[in-house]
Amino acid sequence: MPELPEVETSLRGVEPYLVGQTIKAIVLRVPKLRWAIPHVLTEMSGAIIQRLSRRAKYLILHTNQGDILIHLGMSGSLSILHLEDEISPNKHDHVDLITESGVVLRYNDPRKFGCWLWAEDASEHELIQKLGPEPLSEAFNTDYLFKKSRGKSVAVKNFIMNNDIVVGVGNIYACESLFMAGIHPELITQNLTRKQCERLVTVIKSVLEKAIQQGGTTLKDFIQPNGKPGYFAQVLQVYGRKGEPCHVCGELIQAKVIGQRNSYFCPNCQKLPRSSIK
């Protein structure tokens, strides 16, 4: 499932081809993905793409006729093509954004769980308004995380994956961050110390930044806009490594379902006091 680094990688991959371009047409091959695709998208001929941005896992195309919100869902991906190449769409190529210059932004989504939406101002869209701070922003800091953690009787892994708390820390990066911070994923959130919050904020930022530099993580579906896989999977410390030795201490990596998601951790590097189990 594409997470924040994959979406940021996608943004950086397509941005140079789209900024300043005029939309010629948006071709919809299906009526709905996760939600119905608004018909207004087919009426954006002449709109100029002024800039691109990312909020959480939403990629936003800002135009002079409103904003286009794109979410990659479970298996979505974006690619840049050119009309002159005459590349026919396959069965999972559901949306083409065609520019006057012949550049095509193509959206592929086998599971159809992503979305293409429109808003006059994306920041006011209901899906965006209630999101927590960006993890790489100054708003996500030790004081913020410590304050939010007080009184929370949930497992810390579920806490940092909650988009109301901080956006974009998906399952892979939550597992990796907790390992690097030396925090067991089942630790009850309200038992986090300020020092642990400081360490967790630092490693979340570090893990996400490194993943972005590596082009994201390729496990099943994610491919960069240039057709290449992400390489962060090559440096994963715990995720997907059940039964393999920890790179730090040699203890075998364990896995457990927490919050309906597989969670990977080292029982030695991430020790959990018995009184802290959630």
Image (spheres, helix red, strand yellow):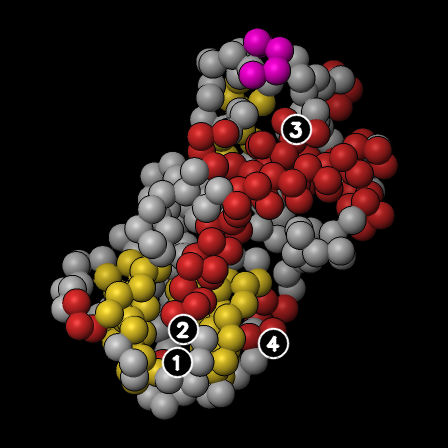
Please state the horizontal and vertical placement of residue 79, each as a whole percent of the image. Answer: 32, 60
Tag shown at residue 124? 4
C-alpha gap between disc 2 and disc 4: 23 Å
Circle 2 sits on which residue?
18
In the image, what residue type sits under mark 3? Met
Badge 4 amino acid = Glu
Q: Count neighbours of disc 4 (C-alpha within 10 A) and say few if under 14, some if 14 to 19, many if 20 or more.
A: few
Q: Secondary structure at mark 2?
A: helix
- Estimate the spatial distance between the alpha carbons at disc 1 and disc 2, rounded to whole Å: 5 Å
Residue 177 colored magenta? no
Determine the residue located farthest toward the top in the rendered image.
Answer: 250
- Point out the image quarter for the C terminus: top right
Residue 148 horizontal/vertical position (percent): 79, 48
Task: Say what secondary structure mark 4 lies in.
Answer: helix
Residue at disc 1, secondary structure: loop
**Residue type marked 2:** Leu
Mark nearest the camera among 2 and 4 is 2
The label number, if any, that marks residue 180 in the structure image = 3
Q: Are marks 4 and 3 in contact (CB under 8 Å)?
A: no
Q: Earlier in the sequence, mark 2 or mark 4?
A: 2
Range shown magenta: 247-251
Pointer 1 and pointer 2: residues touching (CB < 8 Å)?
A: yes
Quadrant the N terminus occupies: top left
Amino acid under label 1? Gln
- What is the spatial separation of the Cα atoms under label 2 and label 3, in whole angstroms? 37 Å
- Residue bearing mark 1: 21
Q: Residue lying furthest bottom in this view?
A: 46
**Disc assigned to residue 258:** none
Q: Earlier in the sequence, mark 3 or mark 1?
A: 1
The percent coordinates of residue 117 (x first, y second) are 43, 73
